[in-house]
Image (cartoon, rainbow, N blue to C red):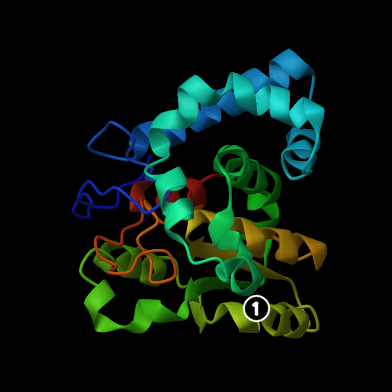
Amino acid sequence: MSQLETPAPHYATGATYSLFGHCVSTHHFYSRTAELIDQIKDREGLTNKSLLDLLLTPDSEKRTRILSSMELSLQEYISGLEKYIRSLPWYKVYTDKELFTRREQYYAYMLSFGLVNRLYIDAFLKADYRIAVLPDWFRRIEYNENLDGLGILLRKHRFELSFIQKTRIKALLRDLSRIDGTVALLSIHGLVELISLMKQSMAEQIPIIGVPLNSSKCPRWAEKPYDISVDCIALENLLLQN
């Protein structure tokens, strides 16, 4: 178990999701989603890889059936999603389509990143170079109050840091794929951005793991971002796997 000692993040709702749900911490989210993954695999006769492929395949009747059965278990982690989507200006459909991510897709993403972690943690831990890919706005001082624990954790595990804009991710992955030696990534982003980076990294055959921000409070999703936090205990437990 993790020995990291950091202050617990404050409870926070998000523009679209919050991993706190009805609890004062996010630990329950991680244990619940791990249990749901195992239940689905056992019931449907799927592997980690086949379940991930299914969850990331849109317009699948089987996926819709599975995620509908998860509604009662996951709905508490959705906060104000439909209201948020209705508030968006129409042109955002063309300029930032991910803002319109729907409820079923959020449920799929909540399960998908845990599956990616299961599939790639061994390769990640064996990699020659391990890089933490973080949003470029993490460097801005006003968002640092609840991120001190993350900084401590990343220094402890001697990560190289890459603060990057969304538009530069493709170029980063292309450059990393040319490096001699094995490279692996740790992503700390909002849930939608995390899955997007994971899909791109897997397409380039670069091992990746990650955890999402505890709620959608980042500048892209919230007009006045605050209470930005990450479950550092969940992250360190992931990094300490053998």
Point 57% across, 56% down: residue = 100
Q: In the picture shown, does residue 193 fall above or below 133?
A: above
Q: In the picture shown, does residue 132 fall above or below 50?
A: below
Q: Residue 216's image quarter?
A: bottom left
Q: In the picture shown, does residue 225 fall above or below 209?
A: below
In the rendered image, which residue does mark 1 sit on? 169
Q: Residues within 10 Å of mark 1 (few under 14, many from 20)?
A: some
Image location (x, y in percent) of residue 65: 71, 22
In front of the other: 32 or 85: 85
Image location (x, y in percent) of residue 140: 31, 83
Point 73% across, 35% down: residue = 48
Amino acid at the residue labelled 1: Ile
Q: Is residue 153 left or right of residue 136?
A: left
Q: Residue 227's image quarter?
A: bottom left
- Report the quarter where the N terminus lies: top left
Point 76% across, 18% down: residue = 44
Point 75% across, 33% down: residue = 51
Q: Is residue 139 left or right of residue 106?
A: left
